[in-house]
Image (tube, grey):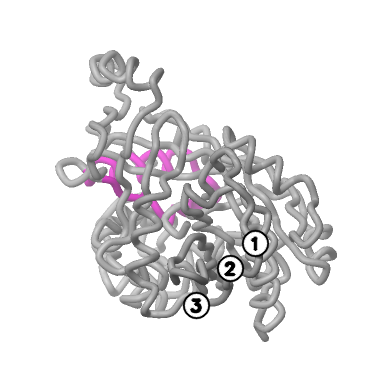
Amino acid sequence: MDARPDPPSPPRRSTDLAFGLATREDEPRLRRLLREAPMEGDIRLAMEREPDFFLGLTIEGDEAQVLVCRDRPTGAVISMGTRSARDGFVNGATARVGYLGQLRTDPAHRGGKAILVGGYADLRRAHDQDPRRPALYTTAIFEGNAPARRILERGLRGLPTYALRGRFVSLVCPPGRRRGRPPTGVTLRRGEPALLEAVAACLQRNARRYQFAPRWTAADLACPERARGLAPEDFVVALRGAEVVGCAAVWDQRAYKQTRVVGYSRRMAWARPVANLLAPLLGTPRLPRAGAALRDAFLSHLAVDDDDPAVARALLARALRDARGRHDLVTLALDPAGPLFEVARGFPHRPYPSVLYAVHWEDGAAAVAALDDRPAWIEAALL
């Protein structure tokens, strides 16, 4: 997701800037930029990648690139963004789906048109040179980030087209005690390696009903790079007899991706003590102190045959209960138009809405125009 732009700084000359792909030598500079360019808002968050930026890149797709803008005089990385692609589902069929994210610019250099235009020109080159390039990309921006949305929706020359595809909501939930009883004939059990083939099949047949959902194979789920930090035992599996009819996972990525609270707006800093006092009564997550790294995880790989609400409710309750003691927050992102949203929002949570775009150059216009109206699936753990 993108950071909120600061007020414009003095314009930079294009001759002062150099664009290209990040190298291994840039790794500490990328981590520094993430630390020093937090996402702005009532809660300022730094999305960090310690101890090695590239560890988190492998889960984003089978192809992932980091494009950077360097200051020629100093060699410093002053802006970055990622372009990734993986097999997913579009209109129910397997297709390459891209994602554009991790857009960050050093606060001292924000607002310069040269960085924006040069960065997108570099992105276009990377797209054109990819023999397996996706026809379309997705990108997500916090709903309240009006300045970034205005820029992207304006249709500026040199930028791809950002076609609004609706909203999705990140539900940030505290681990729970609730027990959800599955329907008669369905049992829940912890995942294991022998179930990965059946779990992958469940994920695929349900993902086809959503736009942009990733296509997981058993090999992906077992791969230490594609599913870094995710073990078969992190899954909760719903079984009807011997058939997997639903699944969910609690994916802890803190070994290579961290979320740190940098600070609060004046309004939120004033409200925080009251919100934390009421949190146990309301069942909502507490707001941590500034500077704290969150003990968070993602509720990922959610799939339920026939969107059975009883099975979904039981899976979510079990996953949140399993997270107790290990995590303070668990995040699940869902399209409000999807069939599982009403089930998920029945659990205590704080909602963080975002807008979703289908992004394309000229060669992807037909693919975006052909998108049907099925709900989107955004796997927050992969962003």
Q: Mark 1 sits on what residue?
A: 13
Q: Are marks 3 and 2 in contact (CB under 8 Å)?
A: no
| Residue 274 spot, x, y in % from top left | 28, 13
Q: What SS does tag 3 mark?
A: loop
Magenta stretch containing residue 110, yes or no?
A: no
Residue 282 visible to the viewer:
yes
Closer to the N terminus: mark 3 or mark 2?
A: 2
Whether residues under marks 1 and 2 lie with C-beta atoms below 8 angstroms apart, the answer is yes
Residue assigned mark 3 = 62
Please state which of residues 248 and 100 is positioned toward the viewer in this rendering: 100
The magenta stretch is 296-323
**Residue 300 magenta-drawn?**
yes
Q: In which quarter of the view is residue 5 placed?
A: top right
Whether residue 348 is situated above or below residue 11 in the rendered picture: above
Q: Residue at x 51, y 68 (%)?
A: 70
Q: Are marks 3 and 1 in contact (CB under 8 Å)?
A: no
Mark 1 residue type: Arg
Dot 3 or dot 1: first in sequence order is: 1
Q: Horizontally, is 199 left or right of 373 in the view?
A: left
- In space, the residues marked 3 and 1 are separated at their CA atoms by 35 Å
Q: Residues within 10 Å of mark 2 (few under 14, many from 20)?
A: some
Residue 129 quadrant: bottom right
* Badge number at residue 324: none
Numbered circle sitting on residue 17: 2
Separation of residues labelled 1 and 2 (CA atoms) = 7 Å
Q: Residues within 10 Å of mark 1 (few under 14, many from 20)?
A: few
The amino acid beneath tag 3 is Asp
Q: Position of residue 39 (x, y in %)?
A: 45, 43
Where 379 sits versus 88, above or below? above
